[in-house]
Amino acid sequence: MGRLYTRRHQFPLRVVKPRAEPCDSLAFAERCSRLPLEIVGFIIVETAKLQYGKRNVAPFCLISKASLPGVRRELYRSVSMSYRYWDVDSREELLEEDFQGLVMNDAAFLRTLKEAPHLGALVRGLTLDLQFYEYLLPEEGTDEIRSSVQTIFGACANISQLEVRTTGDGCPTDYIAETIAELETTPPLEELDITCFGTEIDGLLGRLPKLRNLHLRAHFKLWAMGHRFPSPPPFPFSLQELKYDIESPGVFQAIMHNSHSTLRTLNTTSSLFLDKEVRTALPSFNALKALDVKMYITDHKHSKRTAFAISSLPSLQTLSVHSSPGPSGAPLVDLLIPRLPSSLQTLDLAHIPVDSTSINRFIDRDHATPLPNLRLVRIDSEGWASRKATQKAEKERVQRELALERCEIAGLEVEVGRRY
């Protein structure tokens, strides 16, 4: 019986690359949630660079989609809405039937809230940027913005920070404050920054028991008219930080009704200290650690009252005084230095002419400072040295150097530099 032969086929060897494991979006998202937002953004940007020109965006889409759960909370944490009118040459142009001047950038956000209402719970901060003039704000535009604000606050129940910016001579924040105050459920605001046009703000402040930081400023129209707001009933919140730029001691008293023992930072103007009731209340601000005071030209003649008011604060640690250019600040400084509270650690004098004589008041004959906790004094060069090269200026320069040496011996640091 003959042998049976078989023919064997030879095939060339091929190197087969192992298939890459598919991207595990859930695992990547979990890892992304532990990274800082800046790092996640860097990863997405670098991935986009790698895929550029390859017409293969799948890896980029996978990484971006997987990153979203980890960064969504940060993406929606702070939202900014802008409402404004396009520039027009005249009121007649605005009233033309085919002119649609109102520009609102909230359409996409409102659509998102409608399609994915759960995202509204992630919003913590809201900025409303209102840019238009009074004659460019017809009633229908006001209604549109009011409706938009109602929708946003209705969907974003956890907003704790609100800033209302305004440009021009219109009065838009009035109805913004009214709209929020009329909501069935008031948002749990802890921080509010708003321009005040009238008493409409009282209704909103009266419904914010959780408010901790408040920046309240008057519109320039009210400054020009010298408007003073009537005294409202006490507000329910206890503040930790207050920036108060309106001339109304009555509103200040209502704001501070429950904040005497909680307020830690106050930024205001010296005009506030001209009121006797305010000055009487200052010694009870036992938690106040930082005070920033702006002095205007008309306030310099009241330097004595300002100095006595500041000296009555029992726990003050940081004091900053800003003065308008023009009148000499020496009267205030000379009145203030002997009366500074012993708790003071840092004194910042900006744009106030301070000479060597005033600085020497910090040091006694034994080269020691009468303020045991004072360690730093900042002085702006504009107010420290004379620009004129005169014999008097040279003498002051020498005296200044001696004053600095005395401060150094006493352990007191003096910083001299240009602030602006």
Image (tube, rainbow, N blue to C red):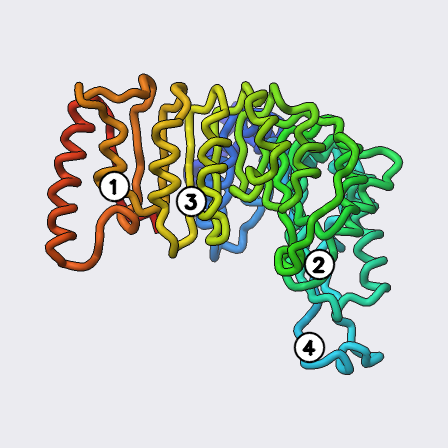
Q: Nearer the viewer, mark 4 or mark 3?
A: 3
Q: Is residue 60 visible?
A: yes
Residue occupying image coordinates x 62% and y 60% = 224
Q: CA distance from mark 2 to mark 3?
A: 34 Å
- Amino acid at circle 4: Val
How many marks can you see? 4
Q: Label 1 amino acid?
A: Val
Please give the residue where the numbered disc 1 appears in the rendered image. 416
From this viewpoint, is residue 8 visible?
A: no
Tell me the amino acid under the disc marked 3.
His
Q: Position of residue 404 (x, y in %)?
A: 17, 34
Residue projecting furthest to the right: 184
Whether 83 is drawn above or below 368: the answer is below
Q: Are there few (<14), some (14-19), or many (20+) residues within 10 Å of tag 1?
A: some
Secondary-structure class at tag 1: strand
Q: Residue at x 66, y 61 (%)?
A: 131
- Residue 83 is marked as 2
Tell me the residue that label 4 is attached to: 88
Q: Secondary structure at mark 3?
A: strand
Circle 4 or circle 1, nearest the eye = 1
Foreground mark, 2 or 1? 1
Task: State the image coordinates of residue 141 (x, y, percent, origin top left).
Answer: 81, 63
Q: Residues within 10 Å of mark 2 (few under 14, many from 20)?
A: some
Query: What residue is shown with label 3?
Result: 322
- N-terminal label among 4 and 3: 4
